[in-house]
Image (cartoon, coloured by chain):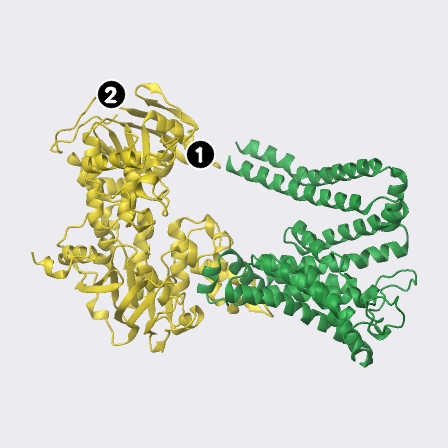
Amino acid sequence: MSIRVAARSLVFVPLTFMVPILVVAAALGIGVLLIAATGASVPTAISAFWTGAFGSSYAIGASLNRAVPFALVGLGFILAEKANLINVGGEGQIAVGGMMATAAALYGAANLPPILAITVPLLVGALAGALWGGIAGMLKVKRGTNEVISTLLLSFVALNLVYWSVQTTTLLRKPQTTAATQPESPVIPQSTWLPPLTSDPASPLHVGLVIALVAAASIGITLAHSTFGLRLRAIGLNPLAARRAGMSEKLPLLALALAGGLGGIAGAAMVQGDQHVLKIGFSSNYGFDGVVVGLLSRGSAVGVVIAALFFAFLRSGGITMEMLARVPSAVVWICQGLIVIALAGSAAWLDYRAKKGRGR
Amino acid sequence: MLKSQAAGKPAAKVTSDVPILQLSGISKQFVGRAALRDVSLSFEAGKVHCLLGENGAGKSTLCNIIFGIHQPDTGEMRFDGASFRPSEPADSLAAGIAMVHQHFSVIGAMTVVENLMLGRTYGRLQRHRAAEKVRALSEAYELPIEPFRLVEDLSVGERQRVEVIKCLMREPRVLLLDEPTAVLPPLEIEALLDVCRKVAARGRAVLLVTHKLAEISEIADLVTVLRAGQVVDSGSPADTDISRFVHSMIGRDIASLDQTLAASLGTKSEAADDESKAVNTRTKVNALMVDGVSYHDAAGVRRLDNVTIEIRGGEIVGIAGVEGNGQSELGAILSGLATPSSGRVFVGDTETTRANPKAITAAGAGIVPEDRHATACVMPMSVAENLFMNDLRRFSRLGLVRRGAMLREAEDLMLRYDVRASGPDAPMASLSGGNQQKAVLARELSLDPLVFLLAAQPTRGLDIGAVSAVYERIRAARDNGVGVLLISSELDELLSVADRVLVIFRGRIVGELPATQSSREAIGRLMAGHPSTEIAA
């Protein structure tokens, strides 16, 4: 009996590594077939992907910058998930964060001393995101509203707030000089831009990456080793017992506000980091993909960083592939979806196997 | 193997020498742990066979094997002499084995008849024909039930009747009952045992799983005792001293057990009362004051009606009542999970009417809630985390948990309260029910200050050793000047542990009696809702 168990676990350990790699390879294989089916040249497409993801210091810098919002939203997701809350509102939290950071940068913060000029818009963005997450948290605590629904619907509200703010000259729209003036904000003052991380002028890499890594480290430690993390876990696993033990009923509110705050920082970092202008749809699904990052990380901060990097390089490569090899963007999205399903499916399958092994 | 027919048992039993169901050498392992080892048993027509054992002794596993939920690793079963290997409950049902589970499997929003027809009819529902059958059965076995009532409106006892009728409708040859009396008030227990007798009298074999000795001496033709998965004793209660079974069941002598516990097992004589009652320990300190509390639930139904309870330090006050008469609501109010509609609550000298759980804890109330899983523990978290859940600040440095210190103190507390686990890091879920409860007691009794303890159904589902430990702790707290409110549906428990007993019926306190054996009948009547005037009659 014990020998059989031991033998199984010997097979099992490499399996947990092999299965995800194999299924991702299979998903990529299907992607290659789809690319071929669209009539594009497969070698051209692959080389375009490589160029876009890793081909230059620009490509690498841009990819790493993309990882920042993925990681921040993913971290917020796992934080709320600890308290058994599903925050799918990353998109809206990014949107309000970016919008309010832009407002702060345009209305005054730019004239503050150097460090404050950068941090004040970031903080304003964080607070706006926290408010957005907090509304869902308040609804949850006071009324028991399902946070999946409230965070999702609040995202649509936020996206339209951005739309409204950049359409309205009295708010954030840049002065209309010609009929062709785009509905977007003016460029925010350079004093509020996130400083570059490297001296390489070709690389767009900015300190957002450092912010994301520091956030990952602190969230990781908080969840695993702090009393706050323990409380979140208790209330997530058994709210009644946690309440009986004197824990605050408002913890879910705090968890969602913190998750929203991380999303807000992500939005602010996108605007202050590389976009420098607030445009309609500037959040371009980073918030929704960030949820997927959080899901794939399976509750670990390190997992979030890995998944965020994976998604960032995938997206960079995909964009270039679309431009250079004329592969339809839909194919890139299909590939991404397949990879997510493959990873989630293999994780579920491994869990099932482990459980079945224990049950015997 | 057990053929001796008890002398002096009620006659008119159909007996035969060939057992209906025979188990030989049954063994079953779960993840390397032996749940059953080489168990051999036989069930004969017309006999009530009692299976006695502590929690975890393997009683339920054995039932589940007979009923086809689990399959044995080794050994074989013979039904009517032929090899019998059920691979699922449907096989056992088809063979003529029915089981009343510990937990009910009825649907509240459906009527009795509809529940009974579930999975047994195809095509058109012939409610009235089914109702005829139900009435016939309920008359034959004296199981009064109204076929067209909604199950959710039935009492616990009535719901169980539905379960029993559900089994009897299949006209089983073997009827298994897994701890059916655990949830019943005293009067209903009598009725159920009566049904068992009648079922056996019709030539069926009955297997009754229990850990109550009083029931055994009343009904069993044969007793088999399981301990740690093995048959350690068997015999007929008619010619065996009942205390021998206790000894076999727990592996130690009944004399070594707590007096009150012996009483709760139903083995203590009624004369030996009161020596554990500590009238002298009652102090003048107010422990709990519930002043005219009423409570309406979310649907507006009145669950508590002008309840007044006053507890001084150093006494144990019991609340007797059939479950569902407001005890849960009272517990929720005292623990801060519900707010009374009117009236006031004081813990010590602090008003806690509208206080949250944290403030109630701070006022000095320890709470052992009735549902350990739902409100006392976070099962997937570690024992240490559960022990200090209400006092995390003690182990916090810069917001981080000082895990080493927490584990050390947890180990210490576990030692003092005899909480057995593989370590303070073990998940709460891995502990037995008894050890979980001891951990909850350890947490609540180490509160400082502690002036009041609520113990709601504190021994439900626990094995005898753990019950003994729980009683010891509660009495020790009382002797230290803590006022205790003991809510229990076990009358024996109340009579032996409490100093006085209040009876609750439909949310009202309908009487107060001293907790002596002589109050038993009066309390039982009050619990059933008979006005106290009838007691004299």
Q: Which of B521 and B147 is in front in this view?
A: B147
Residue B29's label in the rendered image is 1
Q: Report x, y in % for residue B183.
A: 29, 48
A55 to the left or right of B26: right
Q: Report x, y in % for residue B391.
A: 48, 67
Identify the colour of chain B in the image: yellow
Residue B235's label in the rendered image is none
Which chain is the one coloured green?
A
Q: Nearer the viewer, residue A118 or B65?
A: A118
Residue at position x 90%, y 47% in the image = A324
Q: Can residue A38 be seen in this view?
A: yes
Question: Helix, strand, or loop for circle 1?
Answer: strand
A37 to the left or right of B296: right
What's the chain of the residue with tag 2?
B
In the image, residue A215 sits, relative to residue A288, either above or below, namely below
Residue B18's label in the rendered image is 2
Check chain identity for marks 1 and 2: say if they share one.
Answer: yes
Residue that protrudes farthest toward the left in the picture:
B537
